[in-house]
Amino acid sequence: MQDFSIFDLIIITITLILGLKGLFRGLIKEVFGIIGIIGAIFVASRISKETGDLLAPILVLDNPATIKLIGFITALVAVWIVVYTAGIIVSKIFSASGLGVVDRIFGFVFGAAKVFLIFSVIAYALYQVQSFKKVMDEKFDNSFVMPHLISVGSFIIKLDTTALTTSVNKVIDTTKTSEVLEETKNNIKENIQSTTNSIKEVAEEEIVNNVKEKIEDTKNATKEEIDNTKEKLRSIANKPQEN
């Protein structure tokens, strides 16, 4: 059996604390609150394609993933507005009846359930993204609550997230590839600059050495010519004069 982790305690505590709101709101408002949020997600995830197909010609959409996402959001908002309006009407009808303690208790139960279901939807949605999935598997390996959140969320959301997940992963991979290419480009630039500097230094050193050799050769040649000239002058000076 899995042990309770700090994450489990945090989720349960938040659920119970926010559930206290239902204790004061009563059963009717909390029931319609659950239907309005979770019910809207439940229904919208199942009619997202049909809704998207109706809106696609109007919004001029071609991408299947975008069409389904727009359909989901539109259906979600529409169902929520209908349920919220119905909740206000029913709440006003029963406001004078005074259901008493039972109404408060069930209000707390449904309020806590609503919070837990919201957490389930969020957890499941994040779990569909591959990068988040790896982190969640590592961080919440010993969690008792997380598997239940994902299980409940998968039942509520019947939305094919493959296309959206693929798009997200593609963006992540593209970003990583761009970073690698940029780093490689910088490394090549640095290597070229380093090689150029090395060649420049070698060339300068070679030129200096050649100049030194030329100067030395010229110096030696000039010295030899001077010595030869001196020798010729001595020969002329020592040559006997003709009578």
Image (cartoon, rainbow, N blue to C red):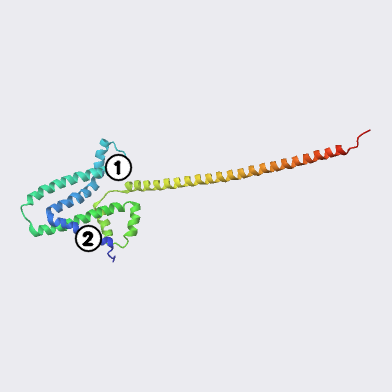
Residue at mark 1 to residue at mark 2: CA–CA distance: 37 Å
Q: Furthest-top residue in view?
A: 243
Q: Secondary structure at mark 1?
A: helix
Relative placement, left or right, of 166 versus 109 is right
- Residue 13: x and y in percent read 22, 60
Residue type at the position of mark 2: Thr
Relative placement, left or right, of 73 versus 109 is right
Residue depicted at x 9% and y 60%: 101
Relative to 67, say whether 110 is above or below: below
Q: Furthest-left residue in view?
A: 96
Q: Examine the rendering and report whether any part of residue 154 can be seen.
A: no
Q: Secondary structure at mark 2?
A: helix
Relative to 211, say whether 142 is above or below: below
Residue depicted at x 77% and y 41%: 224
Q: Which residue has dot 1 on it? A: 66
- Residue 230: x and y in percent read 81, 39
